[in-house]
Amino acid sequence: MSVSDQNSAPETTAIETPKNVALFVTCLVDLFRPSIGFASVKLLEDAGCTISVPPAQTCCGQPAYNSGDKADTRDIAMQVIKSFESYDAVVAPSGSCAAMIKVHYLELFEEGSAWHQRARKLADKTFELTSFLTDIMGRNPVTAHFDGTVTYHDSCSGLRELGVEKQPRRLLEAVDGLTLKEMKDSEVCCGFGGTFCIKYPDISNAIVEKKTKNIDDTSAGTLLAGDLGCLMNMAGKLKREGSQVDVRHVAEVLAGMTDVPPIGKSKKDKKG
Amino acid sequence: MQITSPYFKEKSSEALKDENLQKALGNVERGFIGKRAKAAANLPEFEALRDRSKEIKDHVLDHLDLYLETYEAKVQDSGGRVHWAAGAQDARNIILDICKRANAKTVTKGKSMIAEEIAINEHLERNGIEPIETDLGEYIIQLRGEAPSHIIAPAVHVNKEEVEADFRRTHRHLPPGRNLEDPTSLLSEARSVLRDKFLAADVGITGANFLVAETGTSIIVTNEGNGDLTQILPRVHIVIASIEKIVPTLEDVSQILRVLARSATGQDISVYTTFSTGPRRAEDPDGPEEYHVVLLDNGRSDMLGTEFQDMLRCIRCGACMNHCPVYHAVGGHSYGWVYPGPMGAVLTPTLIGVEMGGNLPNASTFCGRCESVCPMRIPLPKMMRHWREKEFERHATPDRMRRGLSVWAWMAKHPKLYHAGSRLAINLLGLMGRRKGAFKKLPLAGGWTEHRDLPAPEGQTFQQQWAAQHRNSKLEQAT
């Protein structure tokens, strides 16, 4: 598919081309891999956006939400809504956190209430990064170069709640030197599941073992995905298994920011 | 049946170590998924049929009382009888009564999950009546004294060699030297053993995939033909079905049938789709003298009007478990009662109580694949989350998790403290992990590091770096 196809993207373009974009960093990126945040900023700036990072953000509330703690989730959601509602658009380098804001916040407030309306407005202008770059900005800011074969894992929330599937692949096609080799069952869960992997470590392990086998079978040198939770799970398992595969967030490759060591690797073993 | 749902975790750990089971589960993963996908892709109106099927069931559930009464009247018009069973015990008593009045010694059974739910076999046995499962999978697990591990493929956990051993152990009247190595010989043997049972049975019990209100018809969907022999040959036919199986018209049922087999096995339609309306009429060549329908509630009417109502749309196709990574890993028996997989995780706490079944809705990654293939578009992850909310409200969430969560939530609600605290912790972790890039072990992270390394943080948090950059650029602007 060529870059010009992107205008026919299925996503709505109800909002005008946004200028002032707030980055929802996500707690995992903030804590574990800021590089993904900076790669996202670069991609968004290259697409013509002005980026702000509201300092009052912590987490989208998913750990509480998926543990049944609705009251705390609601408080966190209100905090996110307050901090982000004044921007033209909100972008997260995570399908899971973007889906939390875009799909689930609405379920926290009574329909017709003021907070429900505010949640609706925020939901309408919140996007996962690759989806925002292709579906909303409608042009491809990618000018990166990457030597090697990559394989791409579809993270569940982004894929099934937001329809993020073609977007990252379209962007990756524009990366000079990169070959994408699809793995078997790329759309199957990696076994992370947030707190699931801690609550049910044995089952999570059985699931991620299938995933790493499918990754290894592609012989790709690098695994990419759009969600750091899944990436940490797969990177941690690959490393434990002694695999040499590099693991990165798709934004790092798209932004040409692959000078930092891959996830779970150090400077010393950067080159596998 | 011994309910082991509270021990899901322990059972699943055993299942993960069971090599035979793991091999069998590989067949589920390979067998069903591709077939369903192909069947769905080959039918252009498949997605529209899913929408329509959902609408039909939603409509029924909004008017369930009306349709149930219509159905009962139609069954009576055709010479049959409807028995209302509020709970499992009521249903067992009703069925035993009918069997006793028929002087039944043996009862043949078609495949029925409701029969599993009310544990009718044990009840009949205790009362001197021999129940015989006639669906091949059900027959095998009956010989083994097991519960089904899948709602449409009850013996999917059993391999060929185990079946051979079971047949040799139980079919003692057959020559020991017979060849049972290939699946066909196993099938023929089961067939010939069961043929005699069909002829001897006094009562036949089947389930129902649908009950049609406009005609009083019960419908079973099968592939082996055993259901037909079960309900036609004995003098008495008992249908055991739960109240939500109702659909208004034959037209409605024909729409849902088009998504059922495709979602279940990838067939365009099952080999047999059998419609039964009342007992044998004067002009019929065959059929039972008595036709009874036992309508079971067992907690379902309590689901109406709640966040769990959507679950009552379920048509038991099994697509959710066929596509569930957790089911693929641990199999059906780990779920500890009748219904496994995502539909079981939602339904089980409703039917046996959240105290017993509360574990199950927690054992999901919320990957959403079940919902994406559910022909009735049941929001399974959302309902599992509802159970977690109920558990949390009742303070039934494990203490350690609850405490951890409340500390985390408090921090998340105080961004300044959160950032100060996380900066300290992350900078330290970053330093500790810098050399290797990941941790093999870390205090408090045992759940993670038991099976995988924990990638080390880069060092400074994003917020920390971003704030520093902004201070610098502000300084530059100022000078």
Image (spheres, rainbow, N blue to C red):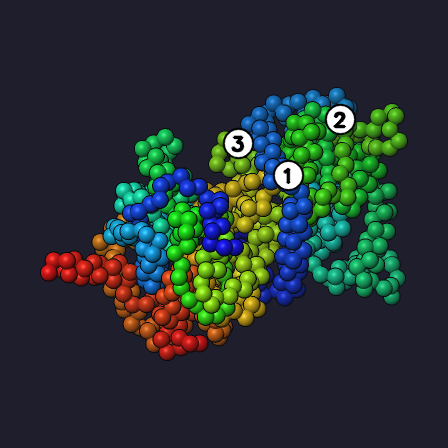
Q: CA distance from mark 2 to mark 1?
A: 37 Å
Residues beneath discs 2 and 1 located on the same chain: yes
In terms of depth relative to the viewer, which is nearer, B131 or B229?
B229
Query: What mark, if any, has residue B128 been given in the picture?
Result: none
**Would residue A110 appear left or right of B85 to someone viewing this image?**
left
Residue A87 location, x and y as percent?
Answer: 29, 44
Q: Is residue A251 above or below residue B262?
A: below
**What residue appears at the point 51 percent right and 66 percent down from the top-left corner?**
A179
* Mark 2 secondary-structure assignment: loop
Q: Are marks 2 and 1 in contact (CB under 8 Å)?
A: no
Q: Chain of mark 3?
A: B
Q: Chain of mark 1?
A: B
Q: Chain of mark 2?
A: B
Q: Are marks 2 and 3 in contact (CB under 8 Å)?
A: no
**What residue appears at the point 40 percent right and 72 percent down from the top-left corner?**
A265
Q: Amino acid at mark 3?
A: Leu
In terms of depth relative to the viewer, which is nearer, B345 or A218?
A218
Residues beneath discs 3 and 1 located on the same chain: yes
Residue B438 location, x and y as percent?
Answer: 38, 71
Task: State which quarter of the image contains the C terminus of chain B.
Answer: bottom left
Residue B331 position by quadrant = bottom right
Identity of the residue furthest to the front in this view: A4
Name the N-terminal-most of marks 2 and 1: 1
Q: Amino acid at mark 2?
A: Gly
Q: Amino acid at mark 1?
A: Glu
Q: Which residue has dot 2 on it?
A: B80
Residues beneath discs 2 and 3 located on the same chain: yes
Query: What mark, if any, has residue B304 been given in the picture?
Result: 3
Q: Which residue has dot 1 on it?
A: B45
